[in-house]
């Protein structure tokens, strides 16, 4: 996956619907947009690779249009990506790192970044069972 340290081409559309922060990263096809310039940890790359495959299957622009318009679709796409991130963590990190990442995943999935789609309890159940 290519990495570019700038905003994605559809950032204005994203910002109208979601609440990205200065540290938000964006997958747009096979390119990962990382405006803050920070390195991407392996478990987060596993997450973004899922989005890349999702977009490849549907078409990048069509995927983003639906992602921004359809809350249920957005949630399903994020659940799949966060599960991959959690699975990577489970296979590669120690208990302390996994616990910390689990808290982050639950916090992010239930945040306003995605439009407050679910509660923390729901995020925990959907990702970790």
Image (cartoon, rainbow, N blue to C red):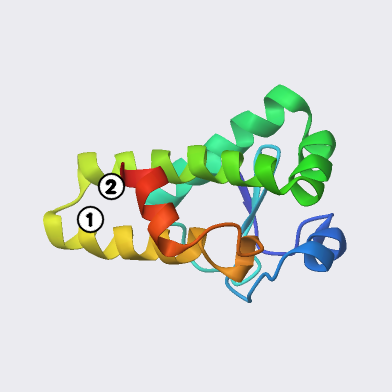
Mark count? 2
Residue at the (39%, 59%) spot, across then down: 121
Q: Position of residue 123 (x, y in %)?
A: 43, 54
Q: Residues within 10 Å of mark 1 (few under 14, many from 20)?
A: some
Indicate whether 82 appears above or below 56.
Answer: below
Q: Is residue 107 left or right of residue 12?
A: left
Residue at the disc numbered 2: 89
Q: Residue 105, located in which quarter of the rendered image? A: bottom left
Residue in view at x 31 percent, y 45 percent: 128
* Residue 35 vertical placement versus 45 (above, below): below
Q: Residues within 10 Å of mark 2 (few under 14, many from 20)?
A: many
- Quadrant assignment for the C terminus: top left
Q: Residue at x 26, y 65 (%)?
A: 100
Residue 58 visible in rendering: yes
Q: Residue furthest left?
A: 95
Q: State the CA–CA distance, disc 2 to disc 1.
A: 6 Å
- Between 21 and 115, which is closer to the camera in this rendering? 115
Q: Position of residue 94 (x, y in %)?
A: 14, 53
- The spot of residue 90 in percent (x, y) is 23, 43
State which tag comes first along the sequence, 2 or 1.
Answer: 2
Q: What number is the disc on residue 106?
A: none
Residue at numbered disc 1: 98
Pick whichever, 94 or 82, lies toward us.
Answer: 82
> Farthest residue in the bottom direction?
22
Q: Could one spot residue 1 in this view of the protein?
A: no
The reply to whether callout 2 and callout 1 are in contact (CB within 8 Å) is yes
């Amino acid at each position: 996956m290519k990495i570019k340290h700038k905003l994605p081409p559809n950032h204005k559309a994203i910002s109208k619907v979601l609440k990205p922060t200065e540290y938000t990263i964006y997958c747009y096809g096979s390119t990962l947009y990382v405006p803050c310039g920070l390195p991407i940890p392996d478990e987060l790359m596993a997450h973004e690779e899922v989005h890349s495959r999702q977009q490849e299957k549907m078409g990048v622009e069509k995927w983003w249009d639906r992602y921004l318009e359809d809350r249920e679709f957005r949630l399903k796409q994020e659940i799949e990506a966060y599960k991959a991130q959690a699975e990577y963590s489970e296979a590669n990190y120690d208990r302390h790192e996994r616990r910390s990442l689990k808290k982050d995943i639950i916090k992010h999935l239930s945040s306003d970044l995605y439009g407050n789609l679910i509660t923390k309890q729901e995020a925990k159940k959907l990702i970790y069972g």
